[in-house]
Amino acid sequence: MAHSNAGRVYARIAGTGSFLPEKVLSNDDLRQFVDTSDEWIRERTGIRQRHVAAEGQTTSDLAYGAALRALEAAGVAPSELDAIIVGTTTPDLIFPSVACLLQHRLGANGCAAFDVNAACSGFVYALGVGEKFIRGGAGNVLVVGAETLTRMLDWSDRSTCVLFGDGAGAVVLKPDTETGILSTHLHADGGFKELLWNPVGVSAGFKPEEKNAGVRVLMAGSEVFKVAVKTLDAVVEETLEHHGLDRHEIDWLIPHQANLRIIQATAKRLDMPMDRVVVTVDRHGNTSAASVPMALDEAIRSGRVQRGQMLLLEAFGGGFTWGSALLRY
């Protein structure tokens, strides 16, 4: 499903922010309790370290830290928000949503507030929804990607526990008549459910005696890799074709930070040198819905991404879900 901005109002990113827990877990630290090595992890994923939420530190805590920085950068007060949309697959509670908890903490009571669960594509999905709010007349929309993925890991499973980290990133969208998000392209295929999933829920529940029972990430890594590369290629091509753009007109690729090899494959497809690709996976690991907004915030605050440049954001996650957002920053 493609959504293009055919009208005169665009959703412009007015400010960004991110927040990481203090605790850092290196690959060498992981060696202490799981059969792995720094070399093994780096060769297969590009990850050197990840941040882990402290005991009692929740997804909404991380979202709050990122939101404050994004609001400050945008010059927007919480009371001026018309909507808060949080992409997450690790909410504090089943309900109320992270967005409602965040709203109350910010003192932005009264505006729309809800979560979007599209796993690692959560922020791109939430950004697509936020853009529609702006096009529909909203003045300021806070979009957040926040996760505490380490809370749902089996720390004895080396195929998954080495991959994920915790964090949050946020953007504030404002209406603009000249520039902003040009289009979002969102897709899913539930037929791939058991290649990357968590077997526990409310309605389905689980039986303790069943194999793989418990809150944990289950993943068929090599199969996920193949589908991710293929679908990200397709959504990149779809995005460029939609606008009649040449791939060399993209200034920056800001991808979901799941695996360095997937990022490199997408960059190769775009014929884009890696110095035009924002990479944070080495320091953050896979932070699911938080990875794209954190990478965007880092690239903007470091001065690499400049106003007027063309950015391509893309992500792939459990579901499977995948999507892209093309914007002129």
Image: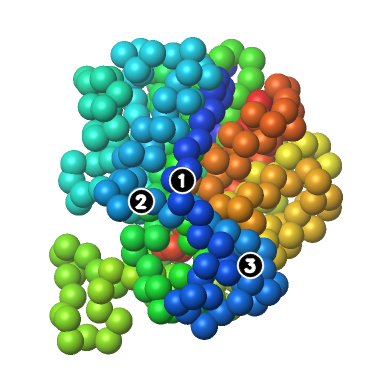
Q: Which residue is identified by label 3?
A: 45
> Disc 3 versus disc 1: distance between alpha carbons?
22 Å
Find residue 285 and report its horizontal and vertical position in percent.
55, 58
Is residue 37 found left or right of 86 in the rendered image? right
Label whose residue precedes the other's in the sequence (2 or 1)? 1
Query: Where is 190 relative to 55, above or below?
Result: below
Quarter residue 215 falls in: bottom left
Residue 197 image position (x, y, % from top left) = 38, 69
Q: Is residue 193 above or below residue 51?
A: below
Which amino acid does the dot numbered 2 rest on? Ala
**Nearest to the observer: residue 106 or residue 80:** 106
Q: Secondary structure at mark 2?
A: loop
The residue at which mark 2 appears reads as: 54
Q: Residue at x 54, y 23 (%)?
A: 15
- Name the residue rendered at 31%, 46% in the picture: 57
Residue 221 occupies quadrant? bottom right
User: In this rendering, does residue 1 appear at all?
Assistant: no
Residue type for callout 3: Thr
Mark in the foreground, 2 or 3: 2
Where residue 81 sits, quadrant-wise, is: top left
Q: Which residue does the numbered mark 1 point to in the structure image?
A: 22
Query: Callout 3: helix, strand or loop?
Result: helix
